[in-house]
Amino acid sequence: MSKQKPQSSDAFVTEITPQSTDFSRWYLDIVRKAELADYSPVKGCMVIRPYGYAIWELIQQQLDQRFKATGHVNAYFPLFVPESLLLKEADHVEGFAPQVAWVTKGGTEELDERLAIRPTSETIIGVMYQKWIQSWRDLPVLINQWANVVRWEKVTRPFLRTTEFLWQEGHTAHETEAEAEEETRKILALYKEFAENVLAMPVVDGQKSSSEKFAGASRTYSIEALMGDGRALQAGTSHNLGQNFAKAFEIQFQGRDKTLQHVWTTSWGVSTRLIGGVIMTHGDDSGLILPPRVAPWQVVIVPIPRGNWQETVLPKCQEIRDQLTAAGIRVRLDADESQTPGWKFAEYEMRGVPLRLEIGPKDIEKASVFAARRDTRAKQSIPMEGLPAAITALLDEIQVNLLARARQFREEHTSTTDSYEEFQRIMEGRPGFVIAPWCESDACEAAIKAETQATIRNIPFGSAPPTAPCLKCGQPATVSAWFAKSY
RNA sequence: CGGGAUGUAGCGCAGCCUGGUAGCGCGCCUGCUUGGGGUGCAGGAGGUCCCGGGUUCGAGUCCCGGCAUCCCGACCA
């Protein structure tokens, strides 16, 4: 098809702040205009609107399937955590105390003991595991819960950091330290695979520095993604809790050798923050770009109304919709007459729909449909014969392309340096990741953060030990750390 | 939690300084028209001016308090 008209690039985007003007405003514009979320009257609490929630449901389904496939089961624990429980693990309470919301009254009566609204559930789950676990035969316990949690954040942003958010938290208990470590790493690998194959969001997997470790964990691992403005986003964490919670909650079992031992526990989670990650990984100045696997509508069909289109074009559109739906594709047919095709093109691009099919009299004549990709904006005519297979293949191609593109962006925004001066220079503007040698001292990490706003995102697995000295102090460096400004 | 800014129709904004019948654009409704990249014309509907108090004959406008949002810092998924 050569009917393509010249495209005035600004024509459809007047209501979205360009990324280059103000990335943060761009992000907020997308969230509201694409109807992903809206502000509520409660500080820091957003409403996830149907289109945004549909994305979350797709994330949930595909993660849940992976959890089940690795032997995990779902359960649900209470929203409230008695204060006494929260106090049991010293590091944990110290880490979370500033962020906890409290219930002090039930109806009109003051409670004897105030209740925390869970910021995370290690403690309440610890109490239950103490009751449920007696023998090595009871292990491992592999439970996940889908839930909401509340953390009293000072600065909030839709999806990225909200006072209340939705997540999943896995909590497992094991017989040995090695098994707990294996679980922790297995889940991190699962998160990475999910982020890359479903969200098309490349991530760096590695270990958190001790200062960024989860409160109460022995070790924390994370996956870190790079956003379009060069800032990093922690996209998921997996914690090896050692025996810290087991000791605090007396979770003990009798081992194969008849001795009484504490279990080894893990916890891990990803949240609605992932939606923010998808927005900022793929979106452009025309709006959202959704990877097909999390797109509520993978294909939108826009009929071109001309003449007696209701009798000719529309039935064909419905037929095609039904064929595609039968092939497992999520399709929306927008036959609304009150909007013109051009309006719909812009609207569904803004909504990030991966593939648009235009069907008009000319296409029906040629027994083809006119397809426009959201990711590349490429347009092509596709024969109606064998359409479901062709569309499925095209969606797969878009999925793969988005990951490749994001990966290339990350590579272009990842640099390596041994020089602190150069490091500081890179951290101005849109920095991306910087790989640099570090001596693993908290002092150097803190100084770098204070001077450049950059933090250690993680220390990737299997990275070669540095030959150069620590970026900051010049003492021998033990690891190559990935630094970035982060969300 | 400190510094700055904002809050007026669904959305974007003007009006506030200098108090006196609440406006504009887009969207929405009706009709015609148009339709392959945000059609055009005509008519119409829509407002606790964020909330609460105060000053005043009279407050969107001035004063005090609160709430929410955004930006910059300190804290975090």
Image (spheres, grey):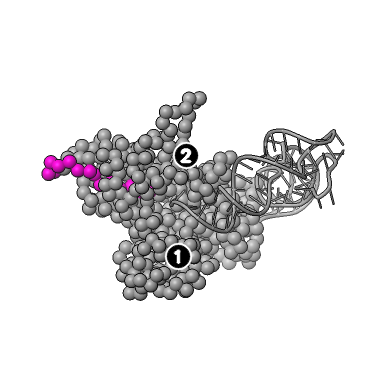
SS majority, magenta: strand
Q: B37 left or right of A85?
A: right
Give the alpha-carbon distance from disc 1 to disc 2, as whole Å. 32 Å
- Residue depicted at x 48% and y 56%: A487
- Residue depicted at x 33% and y 74%: A467
Question: Is there any visible trace of residue A449 in the rendered image?
Answer: yes
Q: Which residue occupies the foreground of this view, A299 or A361?
A: A299
- Residue depicted at x 39% and y 70%: A473
Q: Which residue is mark 1?
A: A448
Indicate the quadrant where residue B10 lies: top right
Q: Nearer the viewer, mark 1 or mark 2?
A: 1
SS at mark 1 in the image: helix
Q: Which residues are magenta?
A: A256-269
Where does the image place residue B71, in percent across and percent down from the top left? 59, 56
Picture layout, residue B28 above or below residue A480: above
Residues marked 1 and 2, same chain: yes
Task: Evaluate if marks 1 and 2 touch, with contact meaning CB atoms under 8 Å apart.
Answer: no
Q: Amino acid at mark 1?
A: Ile
Q: Quadrant of the N terminus of chain A?
A: bottom right
Where does the image place residue A381, in percent across and percent down from the top left? 51, 62
Among all residues in the image, which is located at the extreme top? A108
Q: Which residue occupies the foreground of this view, A57 or A464?
A: A464
Q: Which residue is mark 2?
A: A101
Picture layout, residue A33 above or below residue A228: above
Total numbered circles: 2
Q: Residues within 10 Å of mark 2 (few under 14, many from 20)?
A: some
Q: Residues within 10 Å of mark 1 (few under 14, many from 20)?
A: many
Where does the image place residue A345, in percent across and percent down from the top left? 59, 55
